[in-house]
Amino acid sequence: MGALDFLLQGLATAADPMLLLYALIGVTLGTAVGVLPGIGPALTVALLLPVTYRLDPAGSLIMFAGIYYGGMYGGSTTSILLNTPGESASIITALEGNKMARKGRGGPALATAAIGSFIAGLVATLLLAFLAPTIVKLALVFGPREYFALMVLAFVTVSAAFGDSALRGLTSLFLGLALACVGIDQLTGQARLSFGVPELLDGIEVTTMAVAMFALGEALFIAGQRVQVDDEVTAVKGSVWMNRQDWARSWKPWLRGTVIGFPIGAMPAGGAEIGTFLSYATEKKLTKYPEEFGNGAIEGVAGPEAANNASAAGTLVPLLTLGLPTSATAAIMLAGFQQFGLQPGPLLFATNPTLVWGLIASLLIANAMLLVLNLPLIGLWVRLLTIPKPWLYAGILLFATLGTIGANPSTFELGMLLGFGVLGYVMRLFGYPIAPIVVGLILGPMAEQQLRRALSISQGDWGYLLHSPIAATLLGLAALALIVPLILRARGKGQVLAQLAGDED
Amino acid sequence: MSVQRHEPPRRRDTAALIVAAGLAVIGGVMLWDSARLADLGGYSGVGPASVPRVVAWGLIGLAAWTAVEGLRGDFPERPAQNPAPVLWIVAGLAVQLMLLHTAGFSIATGILFAFTARAFGKRNLAMTIPIGIVFAFVVWTIFSQLLMLHLPAGPLEQLFFPGG
């Protein structure tokens, strides 16, 4: 059976009314958190993990994917109307989008963002469906050493390759790896770093850590800022619809953005932001109206918005086929799979094809829902932006603690939440990136297990790790990703990398 | 989040040195802990203590690197912070943590809600605490009664849902 048959079967699964409801809840929540500044899809999925313990696995995963897609749509609304990105992948959209809104062209800006997101989501999800079976076949020849090499590559690109300092990225990663060591060793059953505290034997709960880092750390950081920016929402004037010229200038950037965003999401490079920067640079170079760039060029909204949605779909390729998360949201979705006892990877396509293909197909449906939610109903989302900050953050903290209490109503767990929240605050204060510590905690134990398996096979011969061409190539790429940025920064070319910082989503 | 890098004046950055010391301490604790594990390497030669040791030495190396950057003043400048709102939120979380099992979810979380709102400028606690408790109670009802999440009940919850 080809990918098309699987996809059609998946569509039949996803058309189940309950699953449609989950998808609708997911995209609605996702759009809402994308619109609200300060909370992103990673945090929302982390908050929902405990709530979904007792729900249907397929439905919950469809909801999580809907949140991811929805977050990418919603972020553009905030960028365009408020000049504050709703989530990190929409930073670029704020450049041109907000200028358009101020010139009274907010409607077409929102429209090109939404339609571009739709087209990119559609094309990229189809690419995901047709690429996945091939990668699964490839992944079947992967042994422990290849997986270990892949994870090392992910560690390096998430922490050291982008951002303004390799030191701070690596420190964040190693803190995550240190936290990952806490608890009972998977292979020998010995307690590590638990200091006789029984609550630590199970290890550090990923959701507690992620919620603390993203919600508490961010709230503390915003609350402590001396200069409180009072954001002003630009009203949407005139028609939401694009005119003939807008269409003519948008369709190529949409397609180019998709082509740029998808592979970047699929690479272990940490986040959807990078694709949006590249797409913006491309559009700026190719445009026929260079004088408009910086003053509200529609291409500068259409391209990056398509790129960030394509990246979101691209991220799902390594997550579903290899079990490898390449962004913070994907890392937390992996925790979501594990919560239901499912391990994403080539085997999942064989053991549970209904679930995987139902998930992929429901993304197509979610994408269509999002277009409807984001164009005709735009007024509703704009109203979300007018919630006063005190109530917004009080609510965020209420739900953040609710998730942790719901998972484990112990004083100890809440103490950990508070401790990690303060850690997240201090890390933000000193400019440490947050994604590496989360990725380190989630991937650390998997990397350790693969390494020990690989070395068991070779009976302790480390050279074995390099004897497979795939593993050697991956490790070589990881070394390059570590060394090249260090040289670039030493030569004073670090600003470009700083702008490409993989942040949160 | 990008923090602007300011060039000179370059001087010793005490906070960065404290961070470096903290990283070195974590590395040291990990080495100490891994020393008491029975290292059953087996066939691989890599036992349960190996990875913590590698991570620990990594942290110690990063601590040294941080110290060097701190001494050279290479750390980015930190945005000015108001301590009061930060402490209000931390206090709110601490109060919630202590009251959760005696006063129940709604009262404990209502106080957290009000303290957070205070940190962001709603100063009238006499108004925000009741609002917070009512809101938290509505949330408690939805999540514990409809979604079957186990949330601690206190006097307020038992008043409305006896035996729940």
Image: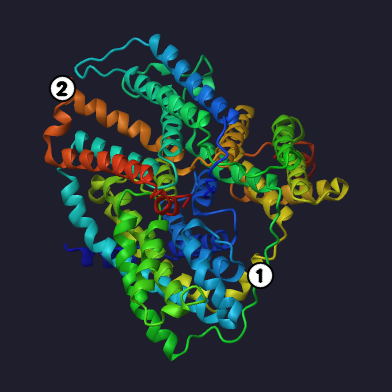
Instruction: Identify the residue at image location x=43%, y=91%.
Output: A244
Does residue A357 sit above or below B123 in this rendering? below
Residue A257 in view of the camera: yes
Residue B140 in view of the camera: no
Q: How many marks?
A: 2
- Mark 2 falls within which chain? A
The label shown at residue A461 is 2
Could you tell me residue A20's position as x and y percent? 45, 65
Is B9 situated left or right of A328 in this image? right
- Location of the N terminus of chain A by quadrant is bottom left
Earlier in the chain: of badge 2 and badge 1, it is 1
Which residue is nearer to you in this view: B29 or B135? B29
Which residue is nearer to you in this view: A75 or A318? A75
- Where residue B14 sits, quadrant-wise, is top right
Farthest residue to the bottom: give it: A244
Does residue B70 sit above or below A157 in this rendering? above
Q: Amino acid at mark 1?
A: Val
* Contact flag, marks 2 and 1 (Cβ < 8 Å): no
Mark 1 neighbour class, 10 Å CA radius: few under 14, some 14 to 19, many 20 or more: some
Which residue is nearer to you in this view: A48 or B69? B69
- Mark 1 falls within which chain? A
Does residue A92 sit above or below A184 in this rendering? below
Could you tell me residue B124's position as x and y percent? 86, 49
Instruction: Identify the residue at image location x=39%, y=57%.
Output: A274
Mark 2, secondary structure of its residue: loop
The residue wearing badge 1 is A233
- Real-space Cα separation, disc 2 to disc 1, in angstroms: 61 Å
How has the structure been colored for display? Answer: rainbow
